[in-house]
Amino acid sequence: MLLKKTLLIAALLSPSLFANAHDYSVGNLHIEHPWSRAMPPVAPTAAAYFVVHNKGSDADRLLSASTPVAGKAELHEHIHADGLMKMQQVQNVEIPAGGEVKFEPMGYHVMLFNLKQQAKDGERFPLTLTFEKAGAVEVDIAVHTDAPEAAGHVEEPHQH
């Protein structure tokens, strides 16, 4: 337990150590560019975004998310209803075979509630994503003041 806390503190204080850790794989899934927007210190919630690519021939589903920095993490989506944009919780998100799902502002996202404190620009925090077939994977969420360029231009090749 102490080791986990020490590692979490080290990760938060040393974001440069993880500067290139933007992509993750589990099973046939590839998670790209996990990030969150820096929010004011008094904001009670935050959201996490990323892109999931399914390189397999079978669909998978994101079932849940969790993080030690929040009391609760839920899968959400924005929908148009009665001429308004509304946010609602979803029980899971299907990742189609050979396809991708973008978790982005005004779309699917992971909503974080009861935050212990808001992360600041340049910091990182862990988020565990649990998929039906591929299993669980822990990703580091990079916190940015503005949406990172790569999240808006996923189709461009990346140099790592």
Image (cartoon, helix red, strand yellow):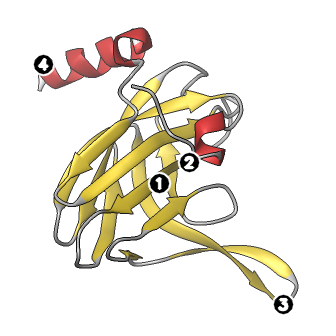
Q: Looking at the image, do the residues carrying marks 4 and 2 touch, with CB atoms under 8 Å apart?
A: no
Q: Earlier in the sequence, mark 1 or mark 2?
A: 1
Residue 65 percent location from the top left of the image: 34, 57
Label 1 crowd bin: few (<14), some (14–19), many (20+), radius 10 Å:
many
For the residues labelled 3 and 1, the Cα–Cα distance comes to 28 Å
Q: Looking at the image, do the residues carrying marks 3 and 2 touch, with CB atoms under 8 Å apart?
A: no
Tag 4: amino acid: Leu
Label 3, secondary structure: give it: loop
Label 2 crowd bin: few (<14), some (14–19), many (20+), radius 10 Å:
few
Residue 48 percent location from the top left of the image: 51, 48
Q: Looking at the image, do the residues carrying marks 4 and 3 touch, with CB atoms under 8 Å apart?
A: no
Q: Nearer the viewer, residue 42 or 151?
A: 151
Query: What residue does disc 3 label?
Result: 82
For the C terminus, the quadrant is: top left
Q: Looking at the image, do the residues carrying marks 1 and 2 touch, with CB atoms under 8 Å apart?
A: yes
Query: What residue does disc 1 label?
Result: 51
Residue 16 position by quadrant: top left
Q: Earlier in the sequence, mark 4 or mark 1?
A: 4
Residue displayed at 58% across by 71% down: 77
Residue at the far right: name it: 83
For the residues labelled 4 and 1, the Cα–Cα distance comes to 30 Å
Query: What residue does disc 2 label?
Result: 154
Labelled disc at residue 3: 4
Q: Nearer the viewer, mark 4 or mark 1?
A: 1
Tag 3: amino acid: Asp
Residue displayed at 71% across by 33% down: 146
Label 4, secondary structure: give it: helix
Label 4 crowd bin: few (<14), some (14–19), many (20+), radius 10 Å:
few
